Amino acid sequence: MAGLSRDSRAELLSAYVDGELSPAEITAVRRMLAGDESAVTDLRELEAVRRVVRLLPELDVPVRLLPEGHYGDRLSAYLDGELATAEMRVVGGHLANCTE
């Protein structure tokens, strides 16, 4: 984990929070967190941002601004709770009814 760029470390910590890492990667991240106070700070900031995003009010986005078709490129953001609230509803509804 040493030598990771800030962006790479942020992606790794995000995957850690989301439970998307292998057991070996989890062990490596925990070692990194045990020895790097700035990594701990980054993790805490990431968790705080995610809590705030989940508390944002629900806003209606004009349907014409939402992408049409399948939402493969939006699924990761959907699962991470990173989409606008209206877009979350649209993608969630698509997932509930899409056979693909």
Image: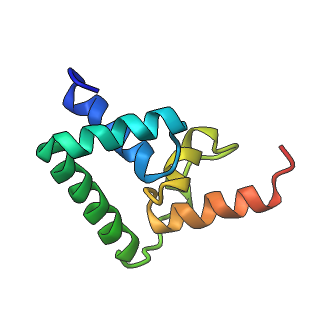
Q: Residue at x 18, y 40 (%)?
A: 35
Picture quadrant where residue 10 is located: top left
* The N terminus: image quadrant: top left
Percent across and percent down for residue 19 are 51, 50
User: Taking 14 as reference, is 1 left or right?
Assistant: left
Residue nearest the viewer, comparing 75 with 1: 1
- Direction from residue 78 to residue 28 in the image, left or right: left
Position of the C terminus by quadrant:
top right
**What colour scheme was applied to this rendering of the protein?**
rainbow
> In the image as oriented, which residue stretches furthest toward the left?
38
In the image as oriented, which residue stretches furthest toward the right? 99
Residue 61: percent from the left, percent from the top?
A: 47, 66
Q: State the residue at coordinates (12%, 44%).
A: 38
**Could you tell me which residue is drawn at 26 percent across and 65 percent down?**
48
Give the x, y percent position of residue 76: 54, 45
Q: Quick check: 24 left or right of 48?
A: right
Near-viewer residue (18 or 100) = 18
Which residue is situated farthest in the top direction here?
3
Relative to 51, residue 98 above or below: above
In this rendering, the count of numbered labels is 0
- Between 21 and 8, the one nearer to me in the picture: 21
* Placement of 32 over or under 87, stated as above or below: above
Locate residue 66 relative to residue 36 in the image: left or right.
right
Residue closer to the observer: 66 or 46: 46
